[in-house]
Amino acid sequence: MRYCSVASASSSAAQNISDLLPDLLLDAIDRAIINQLQKGFPICERPYQEAAQSLGISETELIQRLQAMLDDKRLSRFGPLYHAERMGGGLSLCAMAVPAEDFDEVAVQVNRFPEVAHNYARDHDLNMWFVLATETPQRIDEVLKEIQARTGYPVYNMPKKQEFFVGLHFEV
């Protein structure tokens, strides 16, 4: 699997996300922060302070470490996951068949759309898969047409039929 971002990183199927990151990139505290905050973030008046206390560090250190990991791309994102549909938005899984020689350029073009998330290369005829999250359900079709026009390749829309909750956690 290859993650298709502007700062592209390649990997084979790793059993532990740590296998993807050299030990030099994350110290024990950074690893503890990532492992703990994947499981949830406090909802209270001082959530960073509460999270920091459970990690045995200060609120300031937690904020600084999170910002440093975002700045140097060890973390691609830190924030809540929203249920777009419950908020009146649209959400869909999409795929494209892109020739290998055009793949990187098409990935850059697709990733320029703010509605695109989780763009991955796959070993399949449909070799680029991504999620669209839009402010309205109608915007899904609009973005699909815009991506097709910009890239010259068709985009296959695969809206969900049924939702399943998967408690995903990457131990680092």
Image: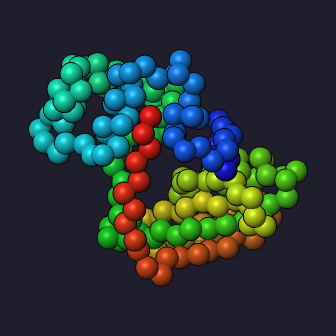
Residue at point 46% right, 30% down?
Answer: 70
Q: What residue do we see at 78% from left, 67% from top?
A: 125
Which part of the image, by quadrant, shows the C terminus?
Answer: top left
- Give the residue furthest to the front: 15
| Front-lying residue, 126 or 151 | 126
Colour scheme of this structure image? rainbow
Q: Position of residue 74 (x, y in %)?
A: 51, 30
x and y, in percent, of residue 61 in the image: 29, 19
Q: Is residue 148 left or right of residue 99?
A: left
The one of 170 and 153 positioned closer to us in this rendering? 170
- Residue 137: x, y in percent? 46, 74
One can see residue 109 in this view: no
**103 in relation to 5, above or below:** below
User: In the displayed structure, would residue 44 be above or below residue 137?
Assistant: above
Closer to us: 172 or 134:
172
Q: Position of residue 12 (x, y in %)?
A: 67, 44
Instruction: Report which quarter residue 6 is drawn in.
Output: top right
User: Is residue 88 something one can see in this rendering?
Assistant: yes
Residue farthest bottom in this picture: 161
Q: Residue furthest right?
A: 101
- Please tell me how many numbered marks the rendered image carries: 0
Residue at 57 percent across and 34 percent down: it is 19
66 is higher (above) or lower (below) than 148: above
Left or right of 86? Residue 75 is: right
Relative placement, left or right, of 7 versus 127 is left
Question: Which residue is at 40% across, 28% downward?
Answer: 31
